[in-house]
Image: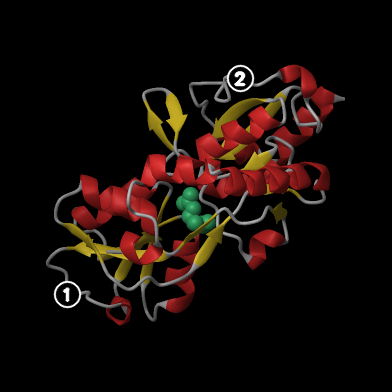
Amino acid sequence: MKSLKKLLALSAAAAVLMSMAGCGSKTESGTGDTGSASVSTVSEGKLIWATNAEFEPYEYREGDQVVGIDADISAYIAEQLGLEAQCEDMAFDSIIAAVQSGKADMGIAGMTIEEDRLENVDFSTPYTDAGQVIIVKEDSPIKTPADLAGKTIAVQSGTTGDTYATDNVDGATVDRYSKGAEAVMAVLQNKADAVIIDNRPANAYVEKNPGLIILDEPLTVEQYAIAVKKGNTALLNEINRILAEMEENGKMAEIMAKYLGGNEDLSEAAE
Ligand code: GLN
């Protein structure tokens, strides 16, 4: 039964599996008591979380470990459920298919709640706010969102930044990259005029690449949540219960502070 399920997932989501790479560490919860799992998961005793570890501060690699806000949230949820957190690192636009096909229990990847996505997965309650921002070179003639018209915009494929550039910018050429870092590189190499990407990862890129700036005006206001397979209310309810508990007991604030320092709100993050 299990292998049949696996086989189906294989044929349904070959692209997902091909783009998949391990995440180094299998246990991120550390103290998980695997004997007391209260929900059934894709792989017994485990909570498999699908992500794209190219999105600092939410998920990124430190050595062979995937760390970040979403990694810590996943570890905490797994621990509370008596499960072992296991990360599956894949292309961002494969995460929903992985959750749908039962390859992963949940998708947590700085993923914005969106109408289109709600047709394919269920989302938890939101755990943070975010927004798309514009990264340009310091000396760029692009000073406001209106200046993007007709320009070449680099985005990470399948993200809300991609959707914004495609649907909202007149006459733009949208160049899609599988990694945010590649989109940023395109601007540094003058292959693109601007990047549209989420505010906090934008901060991380700009900090690491002198000569880039983030324009003041955020383009969108979005909320991140955890995606689960449609109809998996047992897991969804548990995730929502634990997220609420994390808000209440200060765990969420502690995780945010660990990775964000002072950059707590969108306006600050967009500076
Ligand atoms: N928040 C954006 C989205 O949901 C980007 C997420 C990401 O690149 N990891 O599309």
Q: Nearer the viewer, residue 102 or 133?
A: 133
Disc 2 secondary structure class: loop
Taking 270 as reference, is 143 left or right?
A: left
Q: Residue at x 72, y 54 (%)?
A: 122
Query: Callout 1, which amino acid?
Result: Pro
Residue 212 image position (x, y, % from top left): 19, 57
Q: Nearer the viewer, residue 116 or 39?
A: 39
From this viewpoint, is residue 158 visible? no
Is 157 above or below relative to 26?
below
Query: Callout 2, which amino acid?
Result: Thr
Is 54 above or below relative to 125?
above
Is 131 above or below relative to 15?
below
Residue 49 image position (x, y, % from top left): 61, 36
Quickly name the residue at label 1: 141
Q: Which image quarter holds the C terminus?
A: bottom left
Query: Mark 2, mark 1: which one is toward the viewer?
Result: 2
Q: Nearer the viewer, residue 157 or 47?
A: 47
Taking 52 as reference, is 180 left or right?
A: left
| Outermost front residue | 249
Quickly name the residue at label 2: 31
Disc 1 secondary structure class: loop
What's the image's color scheme?
secondary structure
Taking 144 as reference, is 260 left or right?
A: right
Q: Residue at x 37, y 50 (%)?
A: 180
Is there CB contact under 8 Å for labels 2 and 1? no
Residue 39 bears which disc, if any?
none
Q: Which image quarter holds the N terminus?
A: top right
From this viewpoint, is residue 215 visible? yes
Residue 171 image position (x, y, % from top left): 37, 79
